[in-house]
Amino acid sequence: MDTKEKKKSEIEQAGEDLLNFAFDREDVKWLVSRLPEDTTTRERGKVEYELQLLKIISVGWSIPYFLENIPGKNRLMELFWESVQEFSNSISETTSLMTGRDIDYFQTIKHRLDTYLNAMSENPQEKESSAVIGPEFAAACGDGDNVFTLMTGTKMFGAAVDGVREYLTAIEMI
C-alpha cells in the first residue's frame, strides 16, 4: 500500500489556499471588534455574517480579475467555487440540523455575489470597486446610512482583494 499522499498541482494548492483564506474568520472578528461600542449585538451579528459572505465573494471575484489572461485561471476558479459549494453544503446541513430550517448557504453567497456585481455594473463611472462595494455592503447589513458599516465593508473588500493579489504574486501566478 502506498502511504504517500498524492502531490497537489500548483492550481490545486492555490485553490485550497484561497479557500482557506476566504473562510478564515480572524479578520472578520477583528473588523467586528472595531465597530462602535453602541452597536447592538444583533447589528454586530449581521455585520459579521455579511463580512464573511463579502470575504468569500471578494476572493472569488479576485481570481479572474488578477488572472485575466493567465493559463489555469478557469481551472482555479472552478476549484475555488466547487470547494466553496462543498463547504457551504456542510454549513447548510449543520445549520439546518441546529435550527430545524432549511438553509442554502451557497445560494446566499451566489445571491449576494449577484447583488455586488449588479451594483458594480450599474456604477461604471466608479474607478474603484470598493466605492461601490462599501455602500452595497452597508445596505446588505440593513444599515445603508451608517458610515462605520460602510467602511467596515470597504476594508474587508480591500483586504481580501489585496490578500489574493499578494498570494498570487508570491506563488508567481501574476
Image: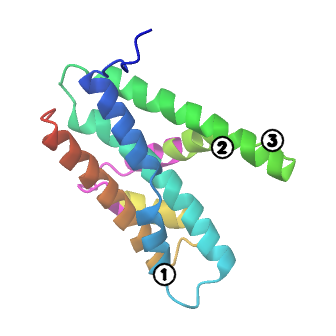
- Three-letter amino acid code of the residue under disc 3: Asp
Quarter of the image with the N terminus in it? top left
- The reply to whether the C-beta atoms of the residues labelled 1 and 2 are less than 8 Å apart is no
**Comes first in the chain, label 1 or label 2:** 1
> Is 173 contained in the magenta span?
no
Between label 2 and label 3, give the one nearer the viewer.
2
Residue lying at 24% horizontally and 54% vertically, measured from the top left? 162
Using residue 16 as the reference point, say whether residue 168 is left or right of it. left
Q: Nearer the viewer, residue 36 or 9?
A: 9
Magenta segment boundaries in residue numbering: 114-131
Q: Which residue is mark 3?
A: 102
Q: Nearer the viewer, residue 1 or 60?
A: 1
> Is 129 contained in the magenta span?
yes
- In the displayed structure, 157 sits above or below 79; it is below
- The reply to whether the C-beta atoms of the residues labelled 3 and 1 are less than 8 Å apart is no
Q: In which quadrant of the rendered view does residue 156 lie?
A: bottom left
Label 3 sits on a secondary structure element that is: loop
Residue lying at 23% horizontally and 55% vertically, measured from the top left? 127
Marks 1 and 2 sit apart, C-alpha to C-alpha, by 26 Å
Q: Which residue is mark 2?
A: 91
- The reply to whether the C-beta atoms of the residues labelled 2 and 3 are less than 8 Å apart is no
Label 2 sits on a secondary structure element that is: helix
**Residue 122 shows in this picture:** no
Question: Mostly what secondary structure, the magenta segment?
Answer: helix
* Dot 3 crowding, Cα within 10 Å, few <14, some 14–19, many 20+: few
Across and down, in percent, residue 170 comes to 14, 43
Between label 1 and label 2, give the one nearer the viewer.
2
Q: Which residue is mark 1?
A: 35
Marks 2 and 3 sit apart, C-alpha to C-alpha, by 11 Å
**Comes first in the chain, label 2 or label 3:** 2
